[in-house]
Amino acid sequence: MHLDVEVETSYPITFTITRDADDPQRQPCIIHRDPIEDGVGQPGIMLFQCTSEISHYLHPVSVDPDQLRAKSLQPQEVSTLDPCFKELVPGASVSWEVPLPDVYFDSFRPGQFYNILWVGGQIPLWDWGTLAEHSNGKLSPKSPALILPGGLVKSLGIIAEESDIDEEAPLPPSPKPRLASARVSGAPILSLSLAGPPTLSFKDRTSAGRLRYTITGTLSYNIDSDAMNGEPVTFHTFRFREVDRRVWGFRLYYGENNQWCPYEPSDPYRYREYRYSNPVANIVGRNDQNAFAALRPGESWSFTREVTEFPENAAPGDQFRYGFKGAQLDWWDWGHLRDHEDTVVWIEEIVCNPRYNGGRPVLIVPASNWVEFALVE
């Protein structure tokens, strides 16, 4: 999920507690849980900043604990009207939705990614029976307390500030392409090559009137790869379908004064991080939207891209080149598509669950060759 801190003043978090359906103790129980004190109070949750949307590297973010409500262990009078009291039978679930405290908003920075981690906790106020049976009585801390294991993570991206690029300072240099040396041991070795015609006609345009240059990409699985003894590999194809990026992926350059200059689109909205819908479950092996592809060693997968972002003053005689600067795939796994007919991943532009690709090595596809072409009449 993406959040615009300039517009939105709250961020809802839903806590859901489920009682095990196989609980050998079959009688109902009641619990008292204040979703603010026990959920987002002390210690409750922790905030981590990520170096990127799919990064393994997390940095804890400090917040002022005095601005968080402390947990209270005072006895509570049982009332069916109190939303903090819930009744649970085996297999049942209860939920509370609470806003993230303002102190966390003070730590957010535009364009950054964060993980909200539930560190674990206890429910000391509980007892066997129903709410009706305990009505008007008092619930005191009980030993042992109920345990709520930690480890659950909610990912959050903060939308970059929108502004007119023409009024900003010059953008920093675009990073250099990723070389083959960036590959990580234990991951399959994939290489990308690009091909396209040497010229682009000034008349070749989209229905919206934009220049259109078609590129063919071929992703190959190195037959000499010794990872997992040459097993097939299945991967999410998003990095090869997304828009051109300054940092990774595909990039257009134009010739000027005997050198190649990266093209920066003038439309300010191109630099805004848009909010995406909630994550959607996808079954990898069914591949209904061609979101996944699979390769055996020695095989290749081909795709096409249309380059439609060109300088407004582009004219016949201009020289361009287009290439893939390299990128880290957000999800991959061993096996062919048929081996993943029961594999479910959650996608919010990229695969967001499972996090960190299930612990498998990072898969880097290095930079491709450059395709050079000229604009002609």
Image: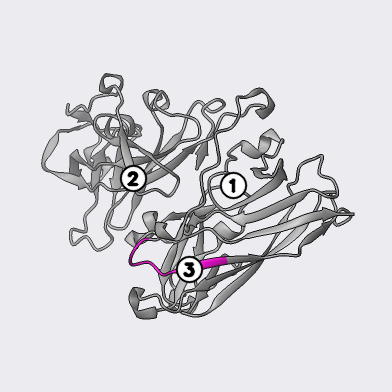
| Disc assigned to residue 190 | 3
Residue 329: percent from left, percent from top: 47, 58
Res. 103 mark: none
Q: Residue at (35%, 34%) from the top-left corner?
A: 83
- The residue lying toward the viewer, choosing from 361 and 157, is 361
For the residues labelled 3 and 1, say whether their Cβ atoms are less than 8 Å apart. Answer: no
Q: What distance separates the C-alpha of mark 3 from that of mark 1?
A: 20 Å
Residue 186 in magenta stretch: yes
Q: Visible in this render: residue 215?
A: yes
Q: Secondary structure at mark 2?
A: loop
Q: Which residue is mark 2?
A: 57
Residue marked by disc 1: 245
* Gap between marks 3 and 2 measured at Cα: 24 Å
Q: Residue furthest top?
A: 66
Which residue is found at the position 41% from the left and 68% from the top? 333
Q: Which residues are magenta?
A: 184-192
Q: Residue furthest left?
A: 143
Q: Using the numbered discs, state the Cα–Cα distance from disc 2 to disc 1 in whole angstroms.
A: 22 Å
- x and y, in percent, of residue 207 in the image: 85, 53
The reply to whether residue 128 is in sight is: no
Image position of 66 (left or right of 315): left
Compare marks 2 and 1 and give the one earlier in the sequence: 2
- Do the numbered discs 2 and 1 sit on residues whose CB atoms are within 8 Å? no
**Quadrant holding the C terminus:** bottom right
| Element type at mark 3 | strand
